[in-house]
Amino acid sequence: GNSVTQMEGPVTLSEEAFLTINCTYTATGYPSLFWYVQYPGEGLQLLLKATKADDKGSNKGFEATYRKETTSFHLEKGSVQVSDSAVYFCALSDKGGGGNKLTFGTGTQLKVEL
Amino acid sequence: DAGITQSPRYKITETGRQVTLMCHQTWSHSYMFWYRQDLGHGLRLIYYSAAADITDKGEVPDGYVVSRSKTENFPLTLESATRSQTSVYFCASKGQGVNTEAFFGQGTRLTVV
């Protein structure tokens, strides 16, 4: 079956530091890949996505590249801000699966300090 | 207002009671989902629906019942609540296509005592 593995958190960084959150996946087909973000007390919202190999998704300074050869979709940001503190979820949607279901990783909490 | 709303936001109930969590979306999205969020487990799919009157089990369906008589509503019922069902529950909806974005409600924090 499909699965997503994310690095354990929490990740604590100083403001303006470089961020990487690792994500690898297992899927039977060729999935679409997503990063969702959850701010405290809120639901999840889409941060970025990539729908095929070598695609790069980007939004709000965050980037992630769909690497089929390493089955990875690592999230990066060059300079984090305190407002980026949230929980980040990697997810996949399998084109071969039923129901357009999203499979999520366990989430990685990011804390950014001044 | 357009969007996806869940109610209630917070609920405390006793073991053995029946509880229904409500979810309503205004986009006429085909797909709707119920997830539970627990520390160390991330989001786990409970049930999903591809259209009105079409539902299917997800990863952790035991102890839950869903129905979808109208496209816009997708209630989740805990038939006899247990402490292990204490969690934060999220409803989501999305349109057709695996590349489309899922939209999430703000969640319902359920405590079973």
Image (cartoon, coloured by chain):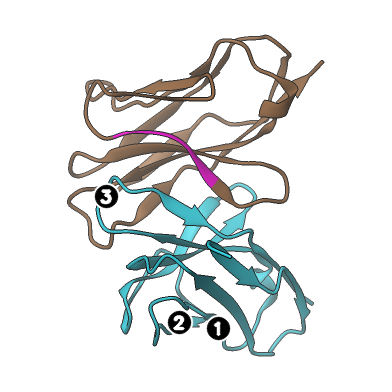
Chain colours: A brown, B cyan
User: Regarding mark 1 in the picture, which secondary structure is present there?
Assistant: strand
Residue A28, position as x, y percentages in the image = 20, 44
Mark number displayed over residue B66: 2
> Which span is picked out in magenta?
A45-50
User: What residue is disc 3 on?
Assistant: B98
Q: Secondary structure at mark 3?
A: loop
Of the two numbered discs 1 and 2 on the same chain, state the one appearing first in sequence: 2
Q: Observer-nearest residue: A91 or B50?
A: B50
- Comparing marks 1 and 3, which lies closer to the viewer? 3
Question: In the image shown, does A89 or A48 lie closer to the viewer?
Answer: A48
The image quarter in which residue B108 lies: bottom right
Q: Chain of mark 1?
A: B
| B84 shown above or below A92 | below
- Mark 2, residues whose alpha carbon is within 10 Å: few (<14), some, or many (≥20)? many
Q: Marks 2 and 3, how far apart in space? A: 23 Å
Q: Evaluate whether label 1 is on the same chain as label 3.
A: yes
Q: Is residue A19 magenta?
A: no
Task: Give amino acid for label 2.
Answer: Val
Q: Viewed as shown, does residue A50 lie left or right of A53?
A: right
| Mark 2–mark 3 CB contact (< 8 Å) | no
Write down the quadrant of residue B29 in the picture: bottom left
Measured from the top left, where is residue B56 in percent x and y? 33, 74
Give the answer, above or below, for where A4 lies relative to B8.
above
Q: Quadrant of residue A25?
A: top left
Q: Give the residue number, with chain letter if any, for mark 1.
A: B77
| In contact (CB < 8 Å): disc 1 and disc 2 | yes
Q: Amino acid at mark 3?
A: Val
Single out the residue that lies furthest toward the front: B1
Closer to viewer: mark 2 or mark 3 = 3
- The residue at the point 65 percent across, 50 percent down is B39
Inspect the image, locate mark 1, and give the three-letter code of the amino acid beneath it: Thr
